[in-house]
Amino acid sequence: MRICRREFIARAGLGLGTLSVLGADLSASREGTNGVVTFQEADPRQTGVMWVHDNAMSPQHYLPETEPPGVAVFDYNNDGNTDLLLVNTGECVFFHPTTPHRHALYRNNGDGTFTDVTEEAGITANLFAMGVAIGDYDGDGHQDIFITGYEKSVLYHNNGDRTFTDVTAASGIHPPGWSSSAVWFDYNNDGKLDLYVSQFVDYSSLRTCGQADSYGGKMDGATPEQRFYCAPRIFRPTSNRLYRNEGGGKFTDVSEETGISKSRGKGWGVVVTDINNDGYMDIFQANDMVANFLFVNREGKRFEEMGLAAGVGYSMDGVPRSGMGVDAADFNDDGWQELFVANIDQEIFSLYLNNRDETFDDVAWKTGIGPVTRMLSGWGLKFFDYDNDGRTDLILSNGHPDDFIDLRSRGVTYREPMVLFHNEGNGKMLNVSEQSGEVFKKRICARGLAVGDLNNDGYPDVVVGVNGGVPLLLYNNVESKNNWLGLKLVGTTANPAAIGAILKWSAGGRVHHRLKNAGGSFLSSHDPREILGLGKSEKVDWLEITWPRPSQRVERFSELPINRYITVVEGKGTTRP
Amino acid sequence: MESDSGACASVYLIGHLTCMVLATMLPAGLLSGQAAQAPEAVLQEAEALHRAGKLDQAIEDYRLFLAQHPEVVQVRSDLGAALAGAGRYEEAITEYKRALKLQSLPRIRLNLALAYFKANQPALAAKELEQVRVKMPDDLRAAMLLADCYLRLGENKKVIQLLDPLEPSQADKLAITYMLGNALVRDGQVARGQVLIDKILRNGDSAEARLLMGITKLMMNDVPGAIVDLQKAVELNPTLPSAHAYYGRALRNAAKPEEAEKALRAELGLNPNDFDSNLYLGVTLKEEKKYDEALRFLQHALEVRPGDLGVLFQIASLHLAERNFDLAQQELEALVKAAPNFLEAHVALATLYYRVKQKVDGDREQAIVAKLTAEQQAREAAAQLPGKGEGSNKAQPPMQSPN
């Protein structure tokens, strides 16, 4: 079902203020210079998304408490509306809730409201969940769910009847310890989705910390007994996991044979992209307090860790930073992927420009991102074209992991504002947060962030997971009046999610590039559909899709509709959903 | 006849080391019995000119006299004083050294130290002052000047060792309290430093007290609080040494690079040889990719502290960033040779080798990085070192020499 944006906003209860604004002249430019709020926070009482994350915060301050939750935006029932999955904490060695905590699967009713279908869908696993990765691993056309967690992770198979079955035991996917972000992609180009799981530290000691070995500076009045969240520095790094999809719901741990387990890190966000355009998807993982990993895929057989060699492991001064959120995109539209990492306060976030020779230069300062992010600690984030002008913008969600940081380090806060950057097209990213809605003035404990079009209006919305709080649904009301084309790609020979597909299109005579990446952000999973921003162009001149291996089929389309979604099935042309 | 304007708080209090007193030491016999145009007349004229502040002419006359009597220690020393007064420190240092070769007098050595100090060579000044202190252990001026040198050199423990015994008996000397408080705070002995700050504050709001409070807050990671105090310090005394420097550092930590630059430049306007300001301004400009200008300040920092590994690393890192690979390679290779455990330098060198396609060398360096990192992690896991966000140094560019 597709409804118009104005109607959707009205139904979603975005407030009379918004309606009156929308009643005004809508010819304003993107930043709402006529008072239009670019991103409007939806009222949970209206949307029905009332679920609250329980961070299990204890006096002992066990480190896993402060990191989740991740969120997912995906269409679990193939009705054309993007649904929400929000994961929660639960039973584990250091946490024993008296009543079981519940995750929340919200079905999008297509009218601005959501219905909690968690129990009927069977998403009831009791674990201390961190994040979520969505992918159709068996190619049956229904999106499956992998939930990461502390001590335990869960794979749910989508039965295609609005229910899921826990298939973890038989799957062969059993990452040990503390799993954080995960991502589905086809590493060996056999057409099946494999699974990469990043692992954080060895927390088996359950060590809790006093002031000396925790985050932040000294706090007046703290007693020796006072517990703080430990700095990850004091925990041992661990190896990540790669699972090869053997078909039939079986996976093999190939971490060792592919070289993945050789590198031990403290992994948070992970994004899959192709940094050298060789047709094999590479893995970029943000590590906390140790160098980031760039696993370059050597023909689907092994991965070469090149973080240092590529210049993305450390700061320009040779210092490892506290990498958390991560993403990749062709920021400057030159056909090569850039990398992004959100770090902790004082470290400045990193935007690594691709030099096209498997090396990168950090241009965060030059683009304007550096000064804005110096005092922030970043988690979920996403490159996306929020105003469909054809350029890649960026949204960041932030918050410090230490709940005492306000008392220990003035100028740094536990709750932090989100930031929205607009790509000016001249190598500069303009901080447009102030004029993009009240939500950017709000301070929150943001963690996971997923982008998806909740109302099918072609303008991507944002869902933010809040540690110990209610998730934020941010509806994109930008009044750019730019045109767009939405694509749902379905691989047949290629992997079903078409991860690795290269999109090239021309609008108004200007040619754009996009690689269909996988993962990114922090503990979260985005709407798998692609939205091509056309600017003021009234048509798509042409669209070329290079399907990933093993297909490598190149298909070229013209006479495409605009301002709607279409489905493109590899080798079978386009259909309208 | 030297004056000591504007160098630092202690120097204000040291006052004037005049050559008038020293001139009276000139042996009378030397001047008696000489003709009217004889050297003694030239010397008298020199002294008169010196007193009148006509230093260039005085220097000329002193030199005329010394051309005929090069062995007269006191006149040689007076010449040094006149040269120092004229801001010609290098020449002054030469004359003081010559005088000391003739006779090793502690007061001349004190003048030599002062000339070094004013020439922004605190390490050399400290060396001379340590000798002076052996001969004149009770000389408060020497002690204070030495403490100031140590402070500038970051030798906080030495400052404490030197001034701790003096402070109780010199309660009226705020400069001593100030320097000791400063050293205690910088040494992390914040509570003790706070006591001295309170003592200064009892004398009313002052730039010195505000500076100390600002430094304290900066070290405790209270950046907004530090900014308030440091801003007040520079308002109360815009020429207070180090006030603009710390204000700039606080602003830099508060993500206000333009204001930080302005403050650091203000410090350098007062004291072009302030090491920290040159370094921080250089690093700030480097971050902003203003490489040429950044290099100038970093090189100046290196002139102030020759051989400082932290500065050498910043310069090499700058050359790497601007893709001057040949130069960066030379510098980094020298750096890791001088400091084999300098992890960041190994990282930069590995990066460089990969950039210039010297994979074997890159792999070798990367192996060293892995080894050093593992050792560091093992130490951290065992020692429970402070975590991220502690102070403003987390993942800050390395600005100090490695251990």
Image (spheres, grey):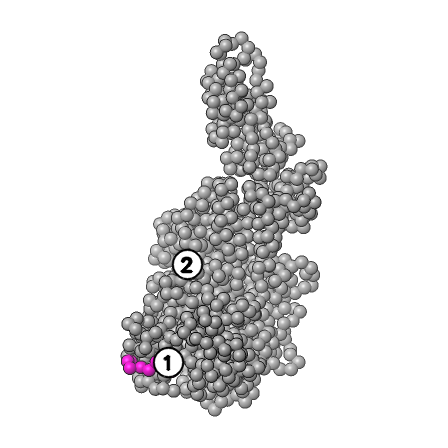
Please tell me if label 1 and label 2 are on a single chain.
yes
| Residue A168 placement, left or right of A100 | left
Q: Nearer the viewer, residue B169 or B350?
A: B169
Secondary structure beneath label 1: loop
Q: Residue furthest bottom?
A: A161
Q: Nearer the viewer, residue B259 or A469?
A: B259
In screen coordinates, is A251 left or right of A546?
Answer: right
The residue pinned by badge 1 equals A563
Q: Is residue B400 above or below residue A288?
A: above
Is disc 1 surrounded by few (<14), some (14 to 19) or many (20+) residues within 10 Å? many
Element on which disc 2 rests:
helix
> Is A282 inside the magenta-drawn segment?
no
Tag count: 2
- Can I make out residue A53 in this image? yes
Residue depicted at 45% across the width and 81% down the height: A5
Real-space CA distance between mark 1 and mark 2, rounded to the nearest whole angstrom: 34 Å
Where's residue A10, x and y in %?
50, 82
Q: Is residue A298 left or right of residue A290?
A: left
What kind of residue is marked 1?
A: Asn
Magenta residues: mostly which secondary structure?
loop
User: Residue at image x 52%, y 85%?
Assistant: A114
Which quadrant of the figure contains the C terminus of chain A?
bottom left
The residue drawn where x is 47% and y is 73% is A36
Task: Provide residue A9's location: percent of width, then percent of height.
Answer: 49, 81
Relative depth, front residue between B190 and A226: B190
Q: Which residues are magenta?
A: A557-565
Which chain is indicated by disc 2?
Answer: A
Horizontal and vertical percent for residue A250?
Answer: 45, 83
Q: Residue furthest front?
A: A24
Q: Which residue is mark 2?
A: A366
| Circle nearer the N terminus (1, 2) | 2
